[in-house]
């Protein structure tokens, strides 16, 4: 049957604050069978089964990075050996790291209108390809525990998330590191664990952060994951540094350059195994997930993305 399938998370910040945006998207689509606002996981799996049966050509996801990770997890599971359709991301989140990494710009309504027009006019799309990571039973593009998890905790605490709040949280973290306050000491609290990359054990067993990405941008335009651009690989990273010592590497991390430090490890990876001494909370694409001790991260399917 083909066609375009659109999945929107109505509980996402953009649509929760502006419910009329959902009506606008459905109006642009015009075809109710192609547009689905999912209410829960069971609803999402139903939509995935429906789109698989219809053999849609393009899947557009409306929401932020967390919505995309949850949607892809269930679509990949439902599709099984069948390749996923081409994808595009309608943005709508706070950070939009995935859309930014793919150079997808504009408001959701504009992205969707352009998508539908070019599809029905049979115009060629500009495309790119991205590897997704399989993180235990989930799929996503960014993984982190330690500092990254605690940064997100601080970011989500209190006032509602926004780009301004993210910049404030980063500035507060840097200022706290300079003066070695309680905030930075708690954020950089160390933890024990073993990490192996492609079967080779990393030399450290005590960490400030362990993280990985299959897209270049971590957030706030920090191009941390330069190995993510290697096909069928993701970028595995970790460091064991106190707050003050990480400051001199912030500029390199922002520009996507390899930090000049023996205490910061960076490798291209197809597989990353993490075994922690104690369970820790972790984040996938901004979603905050319950504590675990063991993680197996592997390269997942390589996805074809429509940029414009």
Image: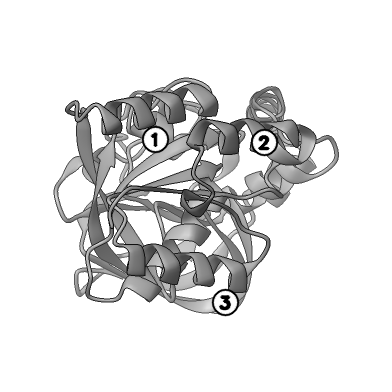
Element under disc 1: loop
**Residue 23 - label:** 2
Determine which residue is flagged by label 3.
292
Which picture quadrant has residue 60? top left
**Residue 152 spot, x, y in % from top left:** 65, 46
Task: Say which label, 3 or 1, has the lower sequence index.
Answer: 1
Mark pair 3, 1: CA separation: 25 Å
Residue 139 position in % (x across, y down): 41, 64
Q: Nearer the viewer, mark 1 or mark 2?
A: 2
- How far separated are the C-alphas under marks 1 and 2? 31 Å
Is residue 71 among the parts visible in the rendering?
yes
Q: Residue at x 27, y 35 (%)?
A: 258
Q: Which mark is residue 217?
A: 1
Q: Is residue 168 above or below residue 159?
A: above
Residue 21: quadrant of the picture: top right
State the quadrant of the C terminus: top left
Image quarter in which the N terminus is found: bottom left
Q: Residue at x 28, y 26 (%)?
A: 118
The residue lying at 46 percent from left, 53 percent from top is 240
Q: Are marks 3 and 1 in contact (CB under 8 Å)?
A: no
Q: Which callout, 3 or 2, points to the residue nearer the camera?
A: 2
Q: Is residue 272 left or right of residue 145?
A: left
Q: Is there a contact, CB below 8 Å, between mark 1 and mark 2?
A: no
Marked residue nearer the N-terminal end (1 or 2): 2
Residue extending furthest toward the right? 158
First in sequence: mark 3 or mark 2? 2
Dot 1, how many residues are within 10 Å of its Cα: few (below 14), some (14-19), or many (20+)? many
Circle 2 Cα neighbour tier, 10 Å, few/some/many (<14 / 14–19 / ≥20)? few
Q: Is residue 226 left or right of residue 76?
A: left
């Amino acid at each position: 049957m083909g066609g375009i399938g659109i999945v929107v998370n109505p509980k996402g910040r953009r649509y929760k604050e502006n419910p009329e945006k959902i009506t606008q998207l459905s109006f642009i689509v015009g075809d109710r069978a192609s547009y689905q606002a999912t209410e829960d996981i069971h609803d999402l799996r139903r939509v995935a089964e429906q789109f698989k049966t219809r053999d849609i050509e393009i899947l557009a996801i409306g929401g932020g990075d967390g919505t995309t990770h949850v949607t892809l997890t269930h679509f990949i599971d439902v599709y099984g050996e069948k390749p996923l359709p081409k994808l595009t991301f309608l943005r709508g989140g706070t950070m939009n790291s995935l859309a930014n990494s793919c150079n997808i710009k504009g408001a959701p309504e504009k992205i969707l209108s352009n998508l539908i027009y070019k599809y029905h006019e049979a115009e060629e799309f500009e495309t790119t390809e991205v590897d997704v990571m399989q993180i235990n039973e989930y799929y996503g593009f960014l993984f982190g525990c330690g500092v990254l998890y605690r940064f997100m905790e601080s970011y989500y605490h209190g006032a509602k998330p926004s780009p301004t709040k993210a910049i404030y949280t980063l500035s507060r973290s840097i200022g706290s590191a300079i003066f070695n306050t309680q905030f930075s000491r708690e954020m950089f609290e160390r933890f024990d664990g073993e990490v192996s990359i492609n079967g080779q054990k990393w030399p450290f067993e005590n960490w400030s952060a362990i993280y990985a990405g299959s897209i270049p941008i971590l957030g706030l335009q920090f191009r941390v994951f330069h190995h993510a651009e290697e096909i069928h690989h993701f970028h595995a990273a970790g460091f064991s540094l106190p707050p003050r010592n990480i400051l001199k590497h912030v500029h390199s991390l922002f520009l996507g350059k390899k930090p000049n430090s023996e205490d910061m490890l960076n490798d291209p990876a197809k597989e990353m195994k993490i075994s922690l001494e104690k369970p820790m909370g972790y984040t996938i694409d901004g979603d905050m997930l319950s504590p675990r001790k063991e993680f197996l991260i592997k390269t997942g399917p390589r996805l074809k993305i429509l940029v414009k």
